[in-house]
Image (tube, helix red, strand yellow):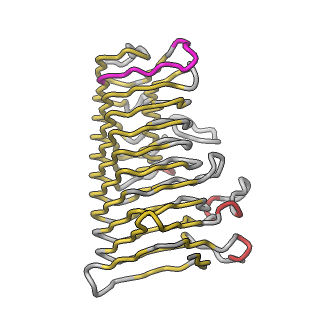
Amino acid sequence: MRFLVYPIEFRGPCKSSSITFEILGSIVAQPKLAWGSIKKEAWLKFRGIDGLSVVGNELGIIDGHGDTWWDLTMVDDYRPNAMIFVLCNNLQIMGLTHINSPRFHLAITNTTNAEISKLHMIAPSNSPNTDGIDLLFSTNINIRNCTMETGDDCIAIKGGTSNVDISEIVCGPGHGISIGSLGQFGRRDEVEAINISNCNITGALNGIRIKTWQGGSGFARNINFTNINFNMVVNPVVSIDQFYCPRQICSESASAVKVSDIRFTGLMGTSKTNKEMIGFRCSNAVPCTNIIVDGVDIEPSDGGQASSLCLNARGIASNVASPPLDCLQP
């Protein structure tokens, strides 16, 4: 079954405490020209529906027809996200295949308690900002057993988000698994209690990272990356970047999002290049503190010499085979 669908919003509050939305065919977005002058945040939007389950039993396909939108000259705000859940507490999403979103494939915001599993996101590696899953202002989120092949972050955890467990993710191509970006436009952002474990990242531009803008405030803390395997990743552990500023010229500020209590355990695999494989770029005004690295062995695929960089980064490294990490300050 194939259903061609215009932008639609499912809005609560609903009387039932448990609602199941089952997708057993293909839901396909209208191409860009059919939208006319309509500007929408999302193609499929669910708002204020507690106890919602959206399931596909591995038969449901969400096709955003994004190939008609991927004009790199187009401002992001003109490209809709494929599917958004807002204020949907006690949410379950499972067994869906998401294809070619115009922008983010799935976004969850202002939501408490969500179980997300067995999703497959697919978009070309050069498709702009086609994140797999974005989390904003949400807590108690469990994401597991998903495959992300996108043009941007496989998963991005943004401001106001806490108590997140992410495991058994296959990521790549794309830009890896990210915390942030945080603090843009001087904003205060807070992210904490994030556990990312048992993930495989293959053929991606980046592996794992925390990215913040200069001039922001707030914190990213109590974040654990455990048992992450890299296979031919260009930048495996661009792990902390407090100078995130893509395609712009940005100066250092006296304020920054504070990054602390970050633990990296069991990072293994190969890098596509022999340049810097681990990077901790932290602010002089707000240094990164209590960075714990335990068990790293990432080798360049060409057999070259691996390297790392630390700037205003304080912590302890142990059981490090490659690259060397003597630059961490105690």
Residue placed at 31% from the left, 35% from the top? 226
Asked whether 57 falls inside the magenta stretch, the response is no
**Camera-side residue: 107 or 272?**
272
Looking at this view, is 256 or 207 the one in front? 207
The quadrant the N terminus occupies is bottom right
| Image spot of residue 149 (x, y percent) | 54, 48
51 w.r.t. 275: above or below? below
Residue found at x 57% / y 60%: 99
Q: Is residue 71 above or below residue 125?
A: below
Please state the extent of the stretch shown in magenta in the rendering: 294-305
Residue sitting at 59 percent across and 48 percent down? 151
Write down the quadrant of residue 49 in the picture. bottom left
Rendered location of residue 283, percent (x, y): 43, 31
Residue 165 location (% of width, % of height): 30, 49
Q: Quadrant of residue 31?
A: bottom right
**In this picture, residue 309 sits left or right of residue 328:** right
